[in-house]
Image (cartoon, rainbow, N blue to C red):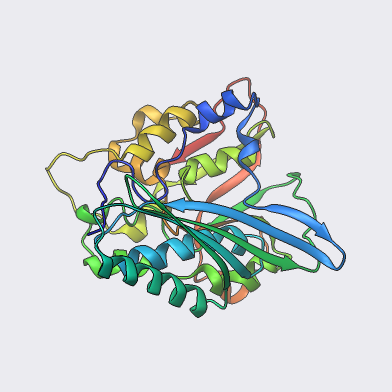
Amino acid sequence: MLDYDQTYFGCGNKLPANNLRDLLEEVSYSFLLPDNNIVKIDNGYIHSTIDTVFPFVDDISTYVMATILHCANDIYASGIKPIQASVSVGISNSLDKTEIRLMFKCIQEGLDALGINSCNYHTFRADQTSITITMNGISRELKPEFEMNGCYDIFLTKPVGVWSTRNIRCQEEDFSVKAILSNNLEWLDFIRSDSVKYATDISGFGLIGHLASIIQNKNYLVSLSLDSVLGPLNFEAKSAPYFLGCSAKSNLESFGSLVENIQELDDIIIDVLFGGEINGPILAIVERGAELGEWFDKLIHIGTASPHMSTKNQIIKVRD
């Protein structure tokens, strides 16, 4: 069976962002952007990305499809479709032949369903099963480079924290599986629109980490609405202790000092805000007051970003 635990799973086994920043001798977290590498070619641009995802669930088909969608999100965030993929699979001794065959079958069927050509497979023996996918897409032109010079609204295409908090919510398990298998492809027209000034997918560094990488050193303050972030999760009050996820702990260490009122947040909220996401939402930065039409009712408006001069390092405020 798939070898997963609740320690480092999904996309949550990243090197901590603060360690990575120190190793690369970077002064801010802006180096975490963009989501993909862009190379100019004769008739356009190639967008390339790579991701590794570890098992997070027993079901092989769910793990595989969520992984494919997770890897595709980096390309979707640029407003384009991935067209080609190379796959590397680490296979542990916990998988039998039937499960290995099923995994490769699901990978091929998942890529085919998204119209992605798989040109190469690589395998290796591993202590823990993993899937690494490199994806490429092509665009004819690029959006103008994002320069923050006004006030902005911040939207998500779906909730954060769905999987990590699934055991304390009122919704049935199907809600968590449906969310983790929902495809951000449906948002391509929105991402391409002039209303969206910048888009990124929320993955291993969590919501706070991705926001920090966008606005650090820009003299901006993000104001996040907890009601808007937590509302779709429909929490159920429980007296049982809640254990903070490892990716949330890692991201809290890296980005916690950037949050103004971090000491007021409990572990559940920290897990939602800081925890890594598997096939998470696309985060869109939209000019304040932009007309979004039919998209507005489907999006989750979680906060705003506004110019803010401060001597403090805290650039994100969480409000009720």
Residue 217 position, x and y percent, is: 67, 30
**In which quadrant is the C terminus drawn?**
top left
The picture quadrant where one finds residue 57 is bottom left
Q: Nearer the viewer, residue 51 or 243?
A: 51
Q: Residue at x 26, y 57 (%)?
A: 2
For residue 286, what is the image quadrant? bottom right
The number of discs equals 0
Quarter of the image containing the N terminus?
Answer: bottom left
Q: Residue at the location (65% across, 73% down)?
A: 189
Could you tell me which residue is drawn at 39 percent across and 65 percent down? 64
The residue lying toward the viewer, choosing from 288 and 76, is 76
The answer to whether residue 64 is seen in the rendering is yes
Asked if 265 appears above or below 160 in the picture, the reply is above
Q: Nearer the viewer, residue 318 or 201?
A: 201
Q: Along the horizontal axis of the image, is 106 left or right of 50?
A: left
The outermost residue toward the right is 42
103 left or right, relative to 236: right
x 80%, y 69%: residue = 140
Residue 259, percent from left and from top: 48, 31
Is 187 drawn above or below residue 315 in the view shown?
below
Percent position of residue 224, x then y? 49, 45
Which residue sits furthest top? 311
Using the image as rendered, state which of residue 182 and residue 238 is in the foreground.
182
Provide residue 167's location: percent of width, then percent of height.
Answer: 20, 54
Residue 260 visible in rendering: no
